[in-house]
Amino acid sequence: MRANGVKLLTMLEGLRQFTIPIYQRPYSWLKEDCKKLFDDVLDAGKDETRVSYFIGSVVYYQDAAHAIGTVPQSLVIDGQQRLTTMVLMLTAIARYLEQNDQPLRALTSSEKIREYYLTNRLEYGDLFQRLLLTRRDKDTLISVVSGHPLPNDFSQRVQSNFEFFLQSVNGDNVRALWAGINKLMVVGVVLEPGVDNPQLIFESLNSTGKPLGQADLIRNYVFMSQQQATQNDLYERFWFPMERAFGANYAAMFNEFMRDFLTMKKGKLVNIDTVYLTFKEDYAQGRVGAEQVEDLVRELYNHATYYVRLRQPEREEHPPLRAALLKLREFGVLVAYPYLLDAYAACVSGSLTKDELAEVVRMIEVYVLRRAVCDLRTNTLNSTFASFGRQIDRSNYLASVGAQFRGLSYHRRFPTDWEFRANFIARNAYNASRTLRYLLDHLENYGRKERVEIGNYTIEHIMPQNSNVSPEWREELGEEWEEVHATYLHTIGNLTLTAYNPQLSDKPFAKKLTMENGYLDSPIHLTKSVVSEPKWDKSAILRRAELLADLAVRIWPMPQSVAAMPDSGDIALDDDEGEEEVDLFATAPSSTEAAS
């Protein structure tokens, strides 16, 4: 490895080409990054006492054995963001000089900038370019440097940053800007193939510039040590299709995929912030050599395709499985994805059918929903699903899943019908707003052919929330009105949906029934059991709660393979004190995620 400080323009000049490897992330600098660099260069140019300005490092493999008459190739390992941005700035300056009668003729010209720093004038095709990017960035930068029309599928980032520089260069600053560019210094780090470890150098330099995400670090780790032909082959066959499958949300979703994939592989939780280290030091250890790397990349690609279907069920072609996954996403059960990734892989390998996988997904929904209704601790769920697949008998998969749920210890238990009903009726449902809306949605739409979008409705307390209970409601509730109000106000029996909450307000029950847009006029099925009551008191609330509990048990039934649950006295207690509570909905994907 050779490292030396050199002027940026000196690095760019001469017959040569800097090439970005296909696995590197796209050009990603934002307008604010470009503005900061532009202002810094301008300040350096105006400061006559400053002789140099350091803007970072460029790490590359130099092709030392190129044939005479050919263009020397430099494969850039780190520094493409700075190089690309400076090429855009130089191109904008050349364009300005060209269009304004060469105001810096004594110092430089548009022709000199293009010939010395942007192109290899006597070469053809890709070799004409001094800097060659990848994919959309490549074609867009070629068009920008050459002044040609943009391609149809152009890079928005390359084009918008070039437009920023075009608008920023003017007659008042161009001279100082050119002076600043002549002061720019970089550390050029030239690597020796077969001697230097580019990954270690790359990691040590990644603290400067725009930091790479976990996904970028993993991709670079896998590809950096491969021969260029292998890089191109594996990237085109596996990695790029994987990136494309994740869509516009690639970076965040790939991080989550790798967290869940590594959790599945290790059988214990992996923190999303340590995904790269876990991948490098554990899962990929000894698997990035030339003989093993294809199997590693293929495995990641295969599981990524499963994960996309789990997280974006619209892509799943099997209707029952798609429906089950849509409900799971709606409920936001992120903790189950490490196990479901394993289950989907088992399905692809033939251990269970898509219908059986759909039943497994429904079991998970019922399990998590019942535990939420029973207000059981959530600190067991992550670890439960992290290791769940390891105990499954692949020769009798569905029955084994049921047995696995049955065998869970007390704190991790699958709530029985009795426990589910009791808590459904008695617990404060209103404060668990996300779970409540999910419950009300499915209670309301069960059996309906025309779905009611409950997002258009608010939750209505039939017995009003107002702590200053009116005389009419005191009479309605009876002598024990204070206890009834305190005990049953937020329970499911006292809650329904309405679009007229302000109008209903604290009105007496009889008025709420008969007023315009009152309960009798309501199209909401959940209100049908309210209008059949002559008065609204403790008995009416409990009767309605029992009816809704019966419906809830039908919607979220105890799976037959799980139904033979032991009594709580026969279940061994477990110790989960070391695990943290989890928010089931902490990063739940929105319904628009699938469109990305």
Image: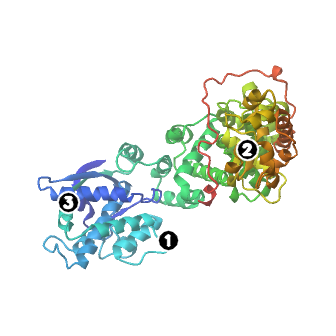
Say which mark, if any, is on residue 507: 2
**Camera-side residue of 479 and 351:** 479
Q: Residues within 10 Å of mark 3 (few under 14, many from 20)?
A: many
Q: Position of residue 372 (x, y in %)?
A: 71, 36
61 relative to 370, above or below: below
Q: Secondary structure at mark 3?
A: helix
**Camera-side residue of 461 and 551:** 461
Earlier along the polypeptide chain: callout 3 or callout 1?
Answer: 1
Residue at numbered disc 3: 180
Give the spatial CA distance, label 2 vs label 1: 60 Å
Give amino acid for label 3: Gly
Q: Residues within 10 Å of mark 2 (few under 14, many from 20)?
A: some
Residue at numbered disc 1: 153
Give amino acid for label 2: Lys
Q: Position of residue 152 (x, y in %)?
A: 49, 75
Q: Secondary structure at mark 2?
A: loop
The answer to whether residue 37 is seen in the rendering is: yes
Earlier along the polypeptide chain: callout 3 or callout 2?
Answer: 3
Q: Residue at x 22, y 61 (%)?
A: 181
Give amino acid for label 1: Asp
Give the spatial CA distance, label 3 vs label 2: 74 Å
Evaluate if marks 2 and 1 touch, with contact meaning CB atoms under 8 Å apart.
Answer: no
Q: Nearer the viewer, mark 3 or mark 2?
A: 2
Q: Nearer the viewer, mark 2 or mark 1?
A: 2
Q: Residue at x 35, y 56 (%)?
A: 33
Q: Position of residue 184 (x, y in %)?
A: 22, 56
